């Protein structure tokens, strides 16, 4: 079997399991699959992949986008998540400016938000979505 045929487990560091469970389960509405044998919280994703939240000391977060969710309608998904209390980032830098939270790169649109531990999450929509 090739790695291209494998499902993926994305692992993110968190510091507070209750706060993370509220964010990922309630606000993002990801299906909670329970804990693994190390106590990491697991959320099922389409195609059999998983999001695994592992409790670690603060300061373990990546400075870059850790997870990006492909969506069909980014503006509608932003509105849905904002109604659930998710706050989106805005950027205004040379060559990287968002309008209504969305960066339009022509063939792709993207918007970023942070989880309670500062992990950078993204929504993206491509022309073929």
Image (cartoon, helix red, strand yellow):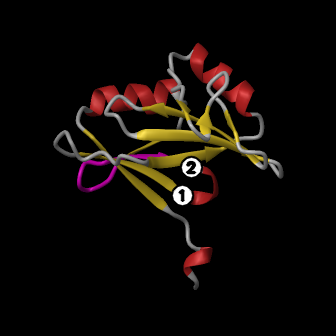
Q: Secondary structure at mark 1?
A: loop
User: Which label number is shown at residue 68?
Assistant: none
Q: Is residue 68 left or right of residue 53?
A: right
Residue 37 lies in the magenta stretch? yes
Residue 68 in the image: state x and y as whole percent: 56, 47
Q: Tell me the residue that label 2 is attached to.
A: 45
The residue segment tinted magenta is: 35-44
Residue 47 in the image: state x and y as whole percent: 63, 58
Q: Is residue 86 left or right of residue 74?
A: left
Please tell me in which quadrant of the rendered image residue 122 appears. top right
Query: Which residue is more in the foreground, 114 or 9?
Result: 114
User: Which label number is shown at residue 49?
Assistant: 1
- What residue is rendered at 24% in x and 47% in y? 60
Query: Which residue is more in the foreground, 70 or 2?
Result: 70
Question: Cβ–Cβ below 8 Å for labels 2 and 1?
Answer: yes
Q: Is residue 74 left or right of residue 54?
A: right
- What residue is rendered at 28% in x and 34% in y? 17
């Amino acid at each position: 079997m090739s790695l291209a045929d494998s499902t993926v487990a994305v692992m993110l560091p968190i510091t507070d399991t209750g706060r993370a469970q509220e964010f990922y389960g309630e606000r993002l509405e990801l299906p909670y699959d329970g804990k693994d044998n190390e106590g990491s919280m697991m959320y099922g994703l389409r195609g059999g992949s998983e999001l695994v939240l592992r409790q670690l000391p603060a300061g373990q977060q990546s400075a870059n986008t850790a997870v990006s969710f492909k969506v069909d309608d980014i503006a509608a998904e932003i509105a849905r998540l904002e109604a659930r209390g998710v706050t989106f980032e805005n950027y205004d830098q040379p060559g990287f400016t968002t309008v209504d939270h969305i960066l339009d790169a022509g063939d792709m649109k993207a918007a970023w938000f942070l989880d309670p531990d500062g992990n950078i999450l993204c929504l993206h929509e491509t022309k073929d979505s």
